């Protein structure tokens, strides 16, 4: 009795399934007839037609047997396109990830880059930090399309400078051509602690006596470092070394053809040339001194430094925005070659 009842139930289920498949097949054929009866030279499928076949594919396993007007791969493509649209809609409903940089900040980055041709991402990022703008240096680099430079240095000297920078100063000379094709010599002494230039002067004929006098003015009241780095320039002769030793300073000469051993001084020469001397025509030593004095004021008070955690040598407080209506104003420095940025006062 139980066997007969099971056979009867199986027959009824097969009959219902057969009728269901037959109904779905008739529905699929009627839908295709409707498409073909449209008055077009080439009937086009609408979004409703595509949705019908996508849903039919999900409920009927033999849907390909009744499909005539398109290939099965086309229906699969419709399904995948609908899947992408669905998740794109779901993603837009809730914003995730890092917030987008405001247009005001993007415009400010481009403005700083346009007004200061020699500035890179670290300099612009340091200036933005002084305005209280919270943006990463990587974001600045992305908008500038700037590639990071290799700042690697030799480990032995790097360790030496890190351990003794509070007690180290460096001096050097570099040349500046004038309009009349004469050469002027710029002598400077720079401290490793805060990259502060202790003394800078210009002369046409540097002598050992003149350099010794510059050193005495660079270290007044006995405020002398323990070491003084200098290269093997012929001007730094025995008389200069004796003057340095008389001030209780130990002179340390660099090796032959090794400017990287006096890297802080060489880096300042590069900054002075790129920020100032490459953009002006020097008439005489008096003109060079005036330009150099203006640049040193900007260098010490305004210019942010990568090696000082984006701080100037004399430090600079972070400006607070007085009101939401305040705008960023540029204050020209060094005759407009560079700028310092501040928030404008509320009206």
Image (tube, rainbow, N blue to C red):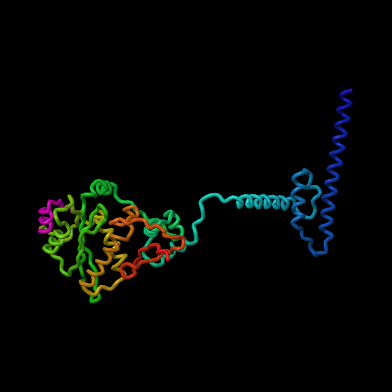
- The question of residue 92 being in magenta is answered with no
Q: Quadrant of residue 298?
A: bottom left
Residue 250 higher or lower than 173, as above or below: above
Residue 143 higher or lower than 7, as above or below: below
| In front of the other: 280 or 239 | 280
Quadrant location, the N terminus: top right
- Number of numbered discs: 0
| In front of the other: 248 or 233 | 248
Q: Residue at x 87, y 33 (%)?
A: 11
| In front of the other: 110 or 147 | 110
The magenta span reads 239-252
Residue 266's x, y, as percent? 26, 58
**Quick check: can you spot residue 95?**
yes
Of all residues, the one furthest to the top in this rendering is 1
Taking the image as shown, residue 12 lies to the left or right of residue 89, namely right
Residue 238's x, y, as percent? 10, 57
Taking the image as shown, residue 102 lies to the left or right of residue 26, namely left
Quadrant location, the C terminus: bottom left
**Quick check: can you spot residue 112?**
no
Q: Residue at x 84, y 60 (%)?
A: 37
| In front of the other: 314 or 43 | 314
Of all residues, the one furthest to the front in this rendering is 347
Residue 3 higher or lower than 198, as above or below: above
Residue 35's x, y, as percent? 81, 58
């Amino acid at each position: 009795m139980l066997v007969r009842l099971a056979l009867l139930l199986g027959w009824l289920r097969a009959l219902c399934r057969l009728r269901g498949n037959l109904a779905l097949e008739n529905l699929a054929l009627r839908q295709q007839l409707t498409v073909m009866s449209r008055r077009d030279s080439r009937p086009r499928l609408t979004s409703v037609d595509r949705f019908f076949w996508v849903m039919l594919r999900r409920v009927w396993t033999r849907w390909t047997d009744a499909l005539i007007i398109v290939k099965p791969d086309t229906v699969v493509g419709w399904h995948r396109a609908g899947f992408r649209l669905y998740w794109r809609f779901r993603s837009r409903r809730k914003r995730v990830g890092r917030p987008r940089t405001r247009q005001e900040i993007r415009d400010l980055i481009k403005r700083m880059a346009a007004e200061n041709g020699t500035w890179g991402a670290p300099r612009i990022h340091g200036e933005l930090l002084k305005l209280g703008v919270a943006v990463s240096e990587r974001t600045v680099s992305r908008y500038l399309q700037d590639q990071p430079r290799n700042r690697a240095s030799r480990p032995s000297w790097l360790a030496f400078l890190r351990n003794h920078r509070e007690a180290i100063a460096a001096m050097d000379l570099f040349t500046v051509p004038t309009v009349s094709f004469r050469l002027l010599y710029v002598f400077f002494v720079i401290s490793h602690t805060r990259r502060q230039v202790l003394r800078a002067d210009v002369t046409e004929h540097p002598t050992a006596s003149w350099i010794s006098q510059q050193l005495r003015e660079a270290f007044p009241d006995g405020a002398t470092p323990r070491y003084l780095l200098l290269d093997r320039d012929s001007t730094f002769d025995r008389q200069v070394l004796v003057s340095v030793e008389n001030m209780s300073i130990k002179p340390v000469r660099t090796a032959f053809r090794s400017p990287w051993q006096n890297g802080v001084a060489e880096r300042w020469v590069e900054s002075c040339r790129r920020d100032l001397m490459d953009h002006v025509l020097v008439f005489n030593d008096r003109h060079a001194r005036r330009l150099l004095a203006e640049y040193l004021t900007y260098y010490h008070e305004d210019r942010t430094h990568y090696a000082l955690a984006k701080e100037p040598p004399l430090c600079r407080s972070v400006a607070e925005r007085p009101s939401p209506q305040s705008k960023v104003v540029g204050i020209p420095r060094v005759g407009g070659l560079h700028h310092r940025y501040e928030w404008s006062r509320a009206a």
